[in-house]
Amino acid sequence: MSQSETRLTQLLVVLCISVGTLCGVIIVSQQPFSGQEQTAQLPYTVTGTGRDTVPPAVSIVSPVPGTVSGSVTILANVSDPVIAGETTSGVAAVQFMVDGIDLGQALSAPPYGGVWNTIGLSNGSHILSARATDAAGNSQTSPAVALYVSNAGSYQADRTPPSMPTNVTAAAVSTRQVNLTWSPSTDPLVPGQVTSGMAGYLIYRDGVQIASVSGTAYTDMNLNSGTTYAYAVAAFDANSPPNVSPQTHVILATTPTADQQQGEPAITNAMSLADIPVGVGQVTLRLVTDIPAVCKYSTVRSQTYQEMPSRFDYSGNLVHTTTVTGLADGQTYTYYVKCQSAAGIANLADDFISLTTLALPPESAAASSASAPLPVATAPAYLAAPAASSTASSTPAASSAPAGLSANPVQSRLPAGFQFPAPMSVNTVSEYARDLQIFLNDRGYAVAAAGVGSFGHETDYYGPATQGALASFQAAQGIAPAVGNFGPLTMARANQILKAGK
């Protein structure tokens, strides 16, 4: 047997966990004819930084520069170089591009190529390139291949815009920045028409285009604090000139003020009230927040939310109400308000509600102290009035109806056939409260002798003045207890009178 026939075939296998560690080296030897194998293990240490910092090498093998048409084979030569002292992470993906726009999906395994159908691409000059990325994230783009596409046929120019972007969001992340995101659009394939492919998106703020981006996100910066902005997005393709999709529906974003923090509730409709009538000792405070929250109040300014002693009676969603009592005539009260979101973010700055009660005229003070409190017919809808006096008279008050109407007129200012649809509660606001006042005033049970609530000056507020007049009506009709509540029995009697035209 010759020397060459007795030569061992050897295979070197290196097993390492990481660079800089001791590795196991296995030598597998095999005699070419006997097939018997022998192995030996040797220690081996790998040195170097271990970080792969060199991108893959990539070049396009096919097609070569020139004119192409129909289906074309594309192929790239890609390799991740071996650098002394560094690991070689290997090629992870190869993305072909036409005019800088991705062509199909990235390829993750060789051969890096396929068949490219140039039909549908506009005739003329185009650039083909390939971008290779290794497993360490290093990437490199090949030298460009200049091509001239020449396809005979009846393909028309691209006149179809991409689909409109969807799922647009706008989030004010600071006093001066709003972040936009949306779902990608697609450029449709239209038979007989060139498909240019997606190119990017146009960003509009308050109806004016402010940017053009290729991705599906945009950051709008250098904005004003405490300002509401309206955003929309449109998609455009690679046609020249580009086809542009319709703009999305407008979405609003409000930057917080300097004394607000992101995520805290915005308080609105916290109305300050003036000219609260004499004798009204309690008032309902009301406000609205833009997100569900729990609201608290204090008579001391600049307390933290946690320090505020009083919680709104009804709170936890968007509308918040609470009743404050013990109001004296001729005084001004200020209630400082803060709310906290479900995420535990509370207002930093105070909002407030101010109340001012009217003072009793000096010349009427003595007379007032000797008589029962007057019904407060002027109480507006926001007042939480006290319960009606139990001393309400059962005799109808003198009506201020125009001359010619009797104390119990058969004419009614309510529409013919009108009926009350449901019972009502005291201290509510409703158009039917106005109808109830008209019903009572028309029949001599005056809600007020003059001014608000009187004949011709009815309101939508069912308060103590209406309650007192209704108590007189109930007493006259034998409805007990005659306390001025518009319940089912009172409603039925009122509807019976209306039906009879009395």
Image (cartoon, rainbow, N blue to C red):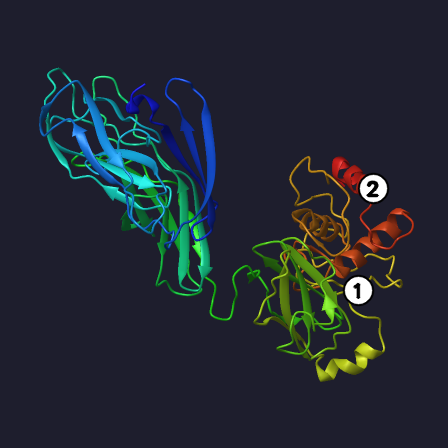
Task: Judge the density around disc 2: few (<14), some (14-19), many (≥20) Cα neighbours within 10 Å.
Answer: few
In the rendered image, residue 365, in percent from the top left (x then y), is placed at 77, 81
Pick whichever of labels 2 and 1 is earlier in the sequence: 1
Q: Looking at the figure, which quarter contains the C terminus? A: top right
In the rendered image, residue 7, in percent from the top left (x then y), is placed at 33, 26
Q: Looking at the figure, which quarter contains the N terminus? A: top left
In the rendered image, residue 381, in percent from the top left (x then y), is placed at 66, 59
- At x 40%, y 42%, the residue is 182
Relative height, residue 253 to residue 260 (above, below): above
Q: Is residue 261 visible?
A: yes
Position of residue 157 in the picture relative to residue 20 (left or right): left
Q: Amino acid at mark 1?
A: Pro
Farthest residue toward the front?
1
**Depth order, front residue of 40/125:** 40
Q: Which quadrant holds residue 468? A: bottom right
Q: Which residue is mark 1?
A: 386
Residues at marks 2 and 1 touching, judged by CB atoms closer than 8 Å = no
Position of residue 195 in the picture relative to residue 259 (left or right): left
In the rendered image, residue 170, in percent from the top left (x then y), is placed at 43, 50
Q: Which quadrant holds residue 228? A: bottom left
Relative height, residue 166 to residue 459 (above, below): above
Q: Which residue is mark 2?
A: 488
Judging from the image, what secondary structure is the residue with disc 1 in? loop
Q: Amino acid at mark 2?
A: Pro
Farthest residue toward the top?
153
- At x 17%, y 29%, the residue is 61
**Depth order, front residue of 12/113:** 12
